[in-house]
Image (spheres, rainbow, N blue to C red):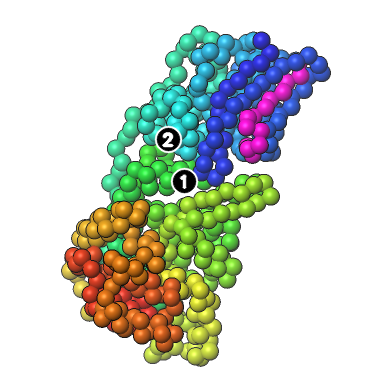
Amino acid sequence: MSYAKVLCVGLVGVTGHLVEVEADLAAGLPAVVISGLPDTALHEARDRVRAAVVNSGQRWPNRRITLNLLPATLPKFGSAFDLAIAAALLGGSGELPLLPLEGVVVLGELGLDGTVRPVRGVLPMVAAAARAGVERVIVPTGNAAEAAVIPGVRVRAVDTLHRLVSFVRDGSPLIEPPPDAPAPDPVGPDLAEVAGQELGRRALEVAAAGGHHIALLGPPGAGKTMLAERLPSLLPELDDDAALEVTALHSVAGLLPPGGRLLRRPPFQAPHHTATVPSLVGGGSGLARPGAVSLAHRGVLFLDEAPEFSKGALEALRQPLENGRIHLSRSGGGTEYPARTQLVLAANPCPCAKPSGDAYCECSPLARRRYLGRLSGPLLDRIDVQVRLMPVRAAELMASVGDAESSATVAARVAAARRAAATRWAGLGRRLNAEVDGPLLRRPPWRLPALVTAELRGRLDSGSLSARGFDRVIRMAWTIADLDGRDRPDREDVREAIQLRTGEAA
């Protein structure tokens, strides 16, 4: 037999596609040709596979070898095809009877000594195999726990090419995935540790309940960073679908923690202000990797010292903030990543950033305007909650930590508000108030009475609020009503939403 075929999976972004690895051995000068739009890592697979086969005690066929990866029009990236290539090649040479691998997806990178090394993106790969009807997969031992997360798929692992050969030839057992260890209790900063700042705590609660973006402006030491770092502790755990999305993104990026379990806590990303555009939105050679905005999907993206970020990096966030997805086009192909995150901006009011605020500020009015002007109007227009924090007073700082509400207490109210919103918008496929389309809220039965929105409409007509800002205030008003247990927002809810939006809240 000079032909064999083994199943594998290729990734484009976080989307997996079933790939058939074909091997054909023909008479002629010894050579290895790989077709099917392989990248550099795949072109180098012929040398890795050859060394791994020989060092595993198998005979290398001195014939003309053609390896084809179907579908040929789909770009192939990475080294996850190595093990499937080795199995197909040995099957085509007659060394292995490949009947035990029929209908089995084989994933793994080969070392020169024949060891099978873990690869990135196994979770979305196995999920794609399950969607295609595959019920059995073989993965590296380092990816076994991660692959076993997908229900309905029988996962087995290998640590060497020799173990796979023994399984196919002699029926030797493969390695079982490790038992699912219980998830550790979440340990993180608590909202009770924040001194004072009742306005900031209220703004954070509204943002958490509705999924709204938030900007915190204030002098150093006011608690901006402390509040932002505690936002994830107010968010509920991710459901199954969201957890799979988030875990798949971290798997593709190679950032999945040991243990391979689903990520249930909303992620938190806080890039340094020197971060580049590709590190924020995604990039890299070949197929673009997910950036911080995608790694914060269903979680929080915190930009501390936001005016210090480059203008290009900040402006690149405008589209994903609006659409919840980001499309990256490169010469090697395009890919799309989800990016539905909560953005938190923190900024000092001026370059000198005196701890006491305006009283001792040394900056001219022009310098202050230029500094905050680095946050462009279109970007700030996408930020629902914009609050100005005052310096913390001595009495607030010396108060007992136990006097303030804990994250658990606030998180219970946030969870109740989110359940109310999810029930209300269930028929529209939305879960959070921040996700609801503006035109829908301006039409019956969700349109608010004219008396309730009188002040809001006045601000729109005067030009102090944009049409986008109008819709975002309405969404926030629904969130405030949900937090207070009301079916519909009233005039006071809209007024509070306006104050949170414009920074007038005190």
Q: Which mark is residue 146?
A: 2
Q: Tell me if 213 is positioned left or right of 362 in this view.
A: left
- Name the kind of residue labelled 2 in the image: Glu
* Residue 202 in view, yes or no: no
Q: Tell me if 154 is positioned left or right of 236 in this view.
A: right
Q: Is mark 1 on a helix, strand or loop?
A: helix
Point out residue 210 in the picture as x, y percentages from the top left corner. 32, 63
**Start-end of magenta stretch:** 63-76
Quadrant of the image occupied by residue 61 = top right
Is residue 287 in the magenta section?
A: no
The residue sitting at 20% across, 73% down in the picture is 399
Point out residue 251 in the picture as x, y percentages from the top left corner. 48, 42
> In the displayed structure, would residue 149 be above or below residue 363?
above
Which residue occupies the foreground of this view, 493 or 212?
493
Quickly name the residue at label 1.
250
> In the displayed structure, would residue 274 be above or below residue 39?
below
